[in-house]
Structures are given as structure tokens and as C-alpha cells.
Amino acid sequence: SQQGEEDPQALSIQEGENATMNCSYKTSINNLQWYRQNSGRGLVHLILIRSNEREKHSGRLRVTLDTSKKSSSLLITASRAADTASYFCATAKIQGAQKLVFGQGTRLTINP
Amino acid sequence: DTEVTQTPKHLVMGMTNKKSLKCEQHMGHRAMYWYKQKAKKPPELMFVYSYEKLSINESVPSRFSPECPNSSLLNLHLHALQPEDSALYLCASSQDLRSSYNEQFFGPGTRLTVL
């Protein structure tokens, strides 16, 4: 069964605006990761947040994790056209932590 | 070198053909993965290798046969595929499976079309 569900499924914003994507999951996790995928290409790891962490930053990215609500959000600030891509959350369970289960993804379009 | 390479980039095959997908990494990673991704869907795990041994098989049909000849190489042998097997096949690697906090590095994928 799909562990992570993301919303929105698609998001279109103007360059310079902030983009927020949300991910919800069902079972307890060891960590949650965010990946970016440009059209038809491989995935690129963006950030990993452990279950005992609440917030993490990397450049223009900010990730939050609320284990009580089983949800995470990815914020991209000051968006650029190059940020246009699909973004996936992936959860690693406590048991079998090496197995990532990906959410459905959010397709982000940054309009110039 | 932080790259995972995959060949070929594109593959068209008939249902009676036998073909292989190849994946290579030189990061010293000891865990390697195969994923299948259909259009506008998330990647789905197929196989995981740890130290050249098959660790996870996600109930994948036997027409897909993985092989890990050494720590840098991962193959996926294809035989008697169906049109519904057409997808992007992604290879990934991570440092090892002993830590659960490892990011996975993905290759660009092989776009497979089964006629």
C-alpha cells in the first residue's frame, strides 16, 4: 500500500514566490526524505529528516516533520524556473528502514 | 564520482526478446536497487541488493531477473515481457543497508517500451 500521500498533486506559481508541498503517511517511520525528479529523468535527493527532528533547512529548502500528525511539508522559497519538477516524499519505516516508499508526488511548475 | 549510470537510455523490445539493463556506480556503495516507474506515478521498488546478495524481492514476476556480478554493477535481465511492463526503470545505490539514514543516488533511468 502507498505509504505517502502528497498534496497538492499539481502546483503552478510565479517565479519568486514560495512553494509548499505536503506529505502525509500512515505508519511510524524512521525517517522521511524528499526527492526531486525532472521530467523523465532520475531522482535527486534533496533532504532527509529523522523521526526525532522537527525542522531542517538546506539552502532555499525547509522541511518540517510532525510525527503526531504523520505529516511533512517541503517549502521552497524564492522559486526559480529551474525548480520546475516533480517532488516526492519517501518514507523509511522503522522495520525494514532500507526500503523507501514514495508518495504520489507533486508536479511543480514555476512560471517566468 | 557521485554518478550512477544506466544503459541503454532507451530500449524497444518485442515480447519474445531477451534483453538486459545495466547499472554502474563507483561510489563504493554496497546497496543497489531497481525501481519501476510508470508515467506520472511514483517509483516502485522491485529489488534490493546488499553486498552483492539479493536482500529484497518485492514479488516481482520471474520475467525480471536481477543480477549483481560485483559491488559496482547491477543488471536486470528481461525475458518474455508484456506491454504493461513498459516503464522507466531506475537504478539507485546507497552506502549500505546497515544505516537507515542513507540517501539513495539514482541513475537517469532506462525508458523501456515493450511491443
Image (tube, rainbow, N blue to C red):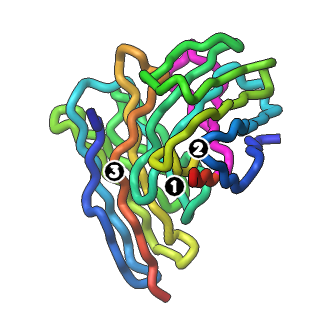
- The lab-note entry on whether marks 2 and 1 share a chain reads no
Foreground mark, 2 or 1?
A: 2
Say which amino acid is labelled 2.
Met
As for residue B11 lying within the magenta part, the answer is no
Alpha-carbon span between mark 2 and mark 3:
29 Å
Residue that appears at 64% across and 34% down: B78
Say which amino acid is labelled 3.
Gln
Q: Which mark is residue A1?
A: none
Alpha-carbon span between mark 2 and mark 1:
33 Å
Quadrant placement of the C terminus of chain B: bottom right
Chain of the residue on which disc 3 is drawn:
A
Q: Which mark is residue B15?
A: 2
- The lab-note entry on whether marks 2 and 3 share a chain reads no
Q: SS for tag 1?
A: strand
Alpha-carbon span between mark 3 and mark 1:
12 Å
Q: What stretch is highlighted in magenta?
A: B90-110
> Quick check: marks 3 and 1 in contact, CB under 8 Å?
no
- The lab-note entry on whether marks 3 and 1 share a chain reads yes
Q: Which mark is residue A36?
A: 1
Q: Quadrant of residue A51?
A: top left
Say which amino acid is labelled 1.
Arg
Q: Is residue B113 left or right of residue A52?
A: right
Say which residue label 3 marks: A104
Chain of the residue on which disc 2 is drawn:
B
Tell me which label, 3 or 1, sits earlier in the chain. Answer: 1
Identify the residue at the far left of this view: A69
Residue that appears at 78% across and 27% down: B73
Foreground mark, 2 or 3?
A: 2
Residue that appears at 51% across and 26% down: B101
Residue that appears at 46% across and 74% down: A78
